[in-house]
Image (spheres, grey):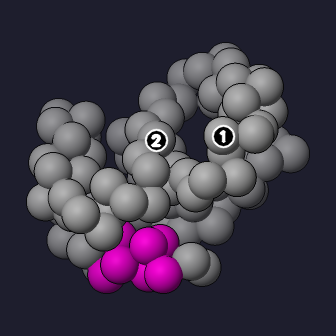
Amino acid sequence: MTEEERILWVQIRDNKLGVKFRRQVGVGNYIVDFYCIEKNLVVELDGSQHLENKEYDKDREVFMDSLGLKTLRFWNQDVRKNLNGVLDIIRKSLN
């Protein structure tokens, strides 16, 4: 896990948001950062490498959508600079 993934994981693990998240889960041919099966929610953290992989990310999101999964994407810097905002968005998506 990246440092940002560790920071977010501490906040969402052990049902801290009222639901169970799993980390580094295989979904089809992809590995997602965090996955809440109960709410069909995928949370992805992106570093600068994703600026160069836009087509891959788009294909990945289309695949997740085809399975009925909602994907939330955050930049690593969002976790570092606005963790509470990231958590608020995740909480709203769980309702």
Provide the major secondary structure of the magenta segment.
helix
Disc 1 is placed on an element classified as helix
CA gap between label 2 and label 1 equals 13 Å
- Residue identifier under label 2: 73
Whether residue 24 is situated above or below residue 61 in the rendered picture:
below
- Name, please, the residue furthest toward the right: 29
Which residue: 60% across, 21% down? 65
Q: Which region shows up in magenta?
A: 3-10
> Residue 37 at what x, y percent from top left?
47, 48
- Label 2 environment density (alpha carbons within 10 Å; few <14, some 14–19, many ≥20): some
Q: Is mark 2 on a helix, strand or loop?
A: strand
Q: Residue at x 24, y 52 (%)?
A: 86
- The answer to whether any part of residue 63 appears in the image is no
Quadrant location of residue 1? bottom right
Disc 1 marks a residue whose amino acid type is: Leu
Whether 76 is among the magenta residues is: no
Circle 2 or circle 1, nearest the eye: 1
